[in-house]
Amino acid sequence: MDIIVFNTFKAATKLPLPQIASYFNLNLEAGWKEYIKIDGYAIEKIFMYESVNKSVYLYKYGCITFVNFKHHEIKHFLEYLAKIYVELDNRFMSKFSEAHIMVIEDNMVRLWEDSDEMYKYNEILVDIAATVLAKSTELSKIETELNKVLDEAEKLINYLNTGRLRANSQKVISIIAQCTRFKYRTIESVRLLDRPPEFGKTMEIRKIFDEMSNFFELNDRYSDMSSRTDVLDSVTEEYFEFKHKQSERRLLIFEILLLAIFPLMHFIS
């Protein structure tokens, strides 16, 4: 029995795939490409020794999946990326990661250790698992950020409940800015759950991708995140609507005062 070990890290906000592909003389296809894969001679060139069955997947949205890498090899590869001017964020790597194992028995693969179903080994199984782990890791980062933004947005609700729309206006502006930045950044995550074209060529490959996605609950997590993002939208919209109505009321009161003053001035004169 053999195992395939996966370790995925959120390494940066984004990764410059064209720059990395150019350095390793990889052909990056035109159009939207989710990841590039580094293996074989390119890996051996970095480590200066034979590296059988090792590969690295680098994703546009900043995640990296290492296959059959030891801890010191992961560290060495990241240091190598830094040398070719790829900016990495150690804070992300310490917070957002996934690990997974696939079991191989007689050239048949279990997608996870206690799975009853087995598939004939094919390199694309590794590609799929690496990609699903990267998507799960990126979702974890978005979920964490959303939790923080919602905690801040709750303060807007408190302002609404007390009617103190002008209270601590600098803090309110900061909260609104955080909400807006989050919504702007997550626009790019709309394609996060898309099945890459290479994973849709046959019914079996599509099935494997969907099974791995379900194992990591990608669709359920994304739906939950979308629902909570809707809550975030409703909070900010309600705040601005309430504030707009309050401004209209102030304007109406001012107009009434003006109308009341004109006859009074006429009477005095």
Image (cartoon, rainbow, N blue to C red):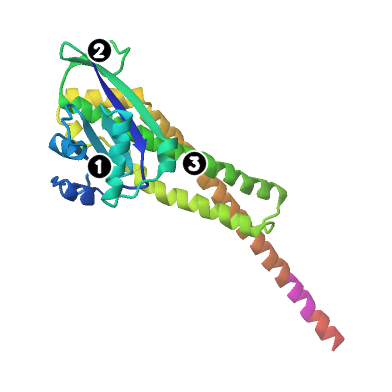
Magenta segment range?
256-262
Residue of label 1: 34
Left or right of residue 203, residue 139 in this image: right
Q: Secondary structure at mark 1?
A: loop
Q: Position of residue 46 (x, y in %)?
A: 20, 40
182 is higher (above) or lower (below) than 197: below
The overriding secondary structure of the stretch rendered in magenta is helix
Residue 201 sits in which quadrant? top left
Determine which quarter of the picture holds residue 220: top left
Q: Is residue 88 visible?
A: yes
**Pointer 3: what residue?**
146
The residue sitting at 31% across, 47% down in the picture is 82
Q: Amino acid at mark 1?
A: Glu
Q: For numbered disc 2, what is the local secondary structure? A: loop
Q: CA distance from mark 2 to mark 3?
A: 35 Å
Q: Residue at the location (52% across, 55% down)?
A: 177
Q: Disc number at residue 224?
A: none
Q: Is residue 166 left or right of residue 56?
A: right
Q: Earlier in the sequence, mark 2 or mark 3?
A: 2
Q: Which mark is residue 117?
A: 2
Q: Is residue 16 left or right of residue 223?
A: left
Q: Earlier in the sequence, mark 3 or mark 1?
A: 1
Q: Quadrant of the C terminus?
A: bottom right
Q: Is residue 213 magenta?
A: no
